[in-house]
Amino acid sequence: MALDSPEGGAAGIIVSAAPSDLSPEGRQPAAIGPWQLALRRLRRNYVTLFFLALLVILVLMCLLAPVYSAHIAGVGPNTNNITGTVSVNGTQQNIVSLSGVPIGPTWGAHYLLGADTNGRDLAVRLLYGGRTSLLIGAVATAVIMILGTLVGLLAGYFRGVVDFILRPLMELIWSFPVVILGVALGTALALGGIGPVKGNSLFIPAFIIGVVYVPYLGKPIRGEVLRLREQDFIDAARVQGMGPWRIMFSEILPNVSTTIIVFLPLILANSILLEAYLSFLGAGVQAPNASWGTLISDGLTYIQTTPTYSLIPGAMLVLTVLSVNVVGDGVRDALDPRAQVRVRN
Amino acid sequence: MTGFITRRLASAVLLLFATSVVVFGIFEVIPSYNPARAIAGRAATAATVAEISQKFGFDKPVWIQYGNTMKLIFTGQIIDYQDNLNVVSQFVHRFSVTLSLVVPAAIIWMAVAILLGSISALRAGGWLDRGLMVAAITGVSIPVFLLAAALLYLFAFRLPWFPNTGYTPFGTDPAQWAYHLVLPWLSIAVLSIGFYSRVLRSNALDVINQDFVRTARAKGLTERQVFTRHVLRNALMPIVTLFGLDFATLLGGAALVTETVFNLPGIGQYEATAIGQLDVPPIMVGAMFTAFFVVLFSALSDVVYALLDPRIRITG
């Protein structure tokens, strides 16, 4: 994973005298800084811009779920309606038939995509489920970013005992199959929750995904830090009397920021995917909440008669993850055209 | 070589131990999880729960419970809480189904990826090359179970070309065996093909400009010989490592969901059911089983790596 930091890459040529002065707000001479250069490359990449727009639309759709629920569908995501009826082409039909089969898509304002066995509006659940999936993905990504960076910085900078404790931990999580670890944690925590957090809280899957993916950021950051700490500008900082924490956060952190940014979309995409995996297996989002993963799983029973039940949440999931991946690729190309990174599932 | 094998074995044993401790620990430190209650069912009285707790040894200290569980696993006597089935014999019994699923799927995915990757390296910038780039990024954005569900709908229900579920053992009828497994194989293989061929392509393009390739051409080898003997051989090496890890995690990931969607009676389905019922022993055995294969395949890929590249000699 040869990720060049701006310090060692093209940026070094432009401001070689002051490598620590690379932050966007840093004083730059007339030459263009690496961030502006990246932005300029990004603005010419129309595929990336298209998928960025798609991502924004998808996120907005999910964020506007309460509006759809209140003003169009007229029911909440967890409103049961087993005995109710809905008018389709002028005739009243049972939302859930007497034998327990839910109605398929009506393609009208009410029950646009049909209902589930509890008579809940699937279109409303699709949007609320999307909120759940995105929220878990975002929280998990934040956890990974913070923990991964911290672990990488500490292990890489202090080495010795700290590294001796943190590295085997990361190796253990790394060699553990992601889905199995997530599932074991998910099933155990879903049952009773942990402390004040209830078993069906959304923060449980978010936390689990965060823990599972920490090494994917922690390991490369650690490697970068190990390399950086031997360089002259760190020695200079040490001679100036900077403490280890100050060196880590004001000297090293800006130099690993490209790595963090390159990994961010990748980790977000994989967090959303892992949430779907866990929810599909029943170890992620718990009832009555929905996520795209639980909807796909619930819909499998009706895949023959109502394929939209599974496949529309599936399509939303894939479009979201795909947009994040394409945008991530574009950002990566803009920052460092040579890099190749990937997170294992 | 002996030192290498010893080190590998030691790390394998250590990893398996750590895996079992982690999985056991996860279920043990969760305060509200009471396996005795899970076995007894919802309507059990306190006396029944206490009785079961004593019978299974849940009232003992954690480390003794751990020791007992490990002893039961390695003597093959551990039973699941839900149906009182022997977990180890279930795994042995179901393993052939899972192998029937993942091995041909892996062969399809590697064969197609090597073929497409080679062609796109030879015609870099062509339509196949660009198509594979799209396939690669799409492939890593689709979860296996979703593709499985879509294939099931399209080619088993909408167009009734393939059976929707079920499994026929290879020994009973090889044709039926393959017929039932085509869709599951595709669900697993298709998503990885794009990514793998892209990796192969970029490796091949790195190699193709190196001096030894020019030397091979200069000494009069045909383009075909240059490509298969020198370029491809070198380009395959990073793939081998990648494949080792991915194949091992198939057992613990893709197999779980694919067997669930297609109702194949393999270990994945057994584990998935156990997850739904919070049945610890199968989850634990499954985790250790998968971790074992992760270790095994990462060791194997090191060996294959050394065989492919004479420059690498395993030291130690």
Image (spheres, coloured by chain):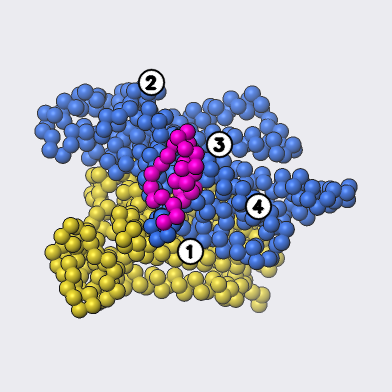
Element under disc 3: helix
Q: Is residue A138 visible?
A: no
Element under disc 4: helix
Element under disc 2: loop
Report how far apart the C-alphas of labels 2 and 1 lie in the structure: 47 Å
Task: Inspect the magenta stretch and tell me whether residue B166 lies in it.
Answer: yes
Report how far apart the C-alphas of labels 3 and 1 lie in the structure: 30 Å
> Which residue appears at 46% of the width and 48% of the height?
B184
Residue to which mark 3 is pinned: B297
Q: Is residue B29 above or below residue A316?
A: above
Disc 1 marks which amino acid?
Leu
> Which residue appears at 38% of the width and 47% of the height?
B165
Chain under numbered label 3 = B
Chain given the colour yellow: A
Left or right? Give the position of A345 relative to A75: right
Which region shows up in magenta? B160-185
Rendered location of residue A177, percent (x, y): 45, 42
Disc 4 packing (10 Å; few <14; some 14–19; many ≥20): few
Q: Say whether marks 3 and 1 touch (CB < 8 Å).
A: no
Residue to which mark 2 is pinned: B75
Residue to which mark 4 is pinned: B115
Element under disc 1: helix
Disc 2 marks which amino acid?
Thr
Report how far apart the C-alphas of labels 2 and 3 lie in the structure: 25 Å
Residue to which mark 1 is pinned: A322
Chain B drawn colour: blue
